[in-house]
Image (spheres, helix red, strand yellow):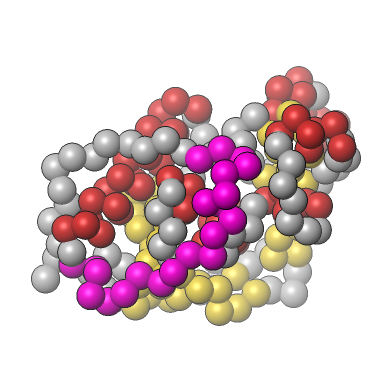
Amino acid sequence: MIRQQPMARVPAVVLSLGSPLLRTVCTPVAASELHSVAFAQETAQLTATLEAFRATHGFGRGIAAPQIGITKRFLALNLGDGPRVLINPTITRWSKDTFTMWDDCMCFPDLLVKVRRHASIEVAFSDEVGNVQVWQHLDRPTSELLQHEIDHLDGLLATDRALGQPHTMGANELLAAFPDVIIARDAFEANKPTFMAMVDYTI
């Protein structure tokens, strides 16, 4: 049975860096929830939030449920062909090859952080109907995005990857303490060639 999406698609507020909910290890979505009205409302709200953020900020390809305070293992993507939801996603294979990049996040849209990601991954997940799907040999843009979003489901942020450990600092503290790996988006936009030369890949 294909679940009907609810009519109301009201975006939520994206939690900011420092919110304790972003540090929660999320619980798997139970099979019994997949066709419930409550879960349909949650997935609709997540996709609506993604689309609203993209419209406002001009970027954003993915969002994880904990970013709007829902501590369950699902996320929404829009890779240019409309929003889709991945439920209980798991990375099942990582490439040995890695690369560095300036990563961004809806939870701190004014920052970019230097992280290292695997060049390609394989991901297994359930779709909204409950069918298990496997994405293999993913390209670099999709791989790095899914690594970022699945980290959110485990209570990890890109800033943790940049620093090599979890932290409790706010955006201004991070900018002051770690200027080599955390920069202001405005600074990046003002001097792109310099910052792009510091990493292997840019979004």
Image side of residue 184 versus residue 67, left or right = right
Q: Foreground: 2 or 141? A: 2
Residue 72 vertical placement versus 167 (above, below): below
Residue 162 vertical placement versus 24 (above, below): above
Image side of residue 25 versus residue 118, left or right = left
Question: Do we see residue 115 in this rendering?
Answer: no
Which image quadrant: the C terminus? top right
Looking at the image, which residue is at 68% across and 64% down? 119
Q: Position of residue 67 (x, y in %)?
A: 48, 47
Residue 27 vertical placement versus 203 (above, below): below
Looking at the image, which residue is at 14% across and 42% down? 7
Looking at the image, which residue is at 48% across and 65% down? 26
Q: Is residue 22 magenta?
A: yes
Question: Do we see residue 5 in this rendering?
Answer: yes
Q: Position of residue 36 (x, y in %)?
A: 18, 64
Q: Quadrant of residue 99?
A: bottom right
Q: Quadrant of residue 107?
A: top right
Image side of residue 18 versus residue 77, left or right = right
Q: Quadrant of residue 187?
A: top right
Q: Position of residue 124 (x, y in %)?
A: 45, 75
Q: Position of residue 75 (x, y in %)?
A: 42, 57
Looking at the image, which residue is at 42% across and 35% down? 13
Q: Count all numbered tags in the image, as a single digit.
A: 0
**Span shown in magenta:** 15-35
Which image quadrant: the N terminus? bottom left
Main SS, magenta residues = loop
Q: Foreground: 193 or 149? A: 149
Q: Foreground: 26 or 78? A: 26
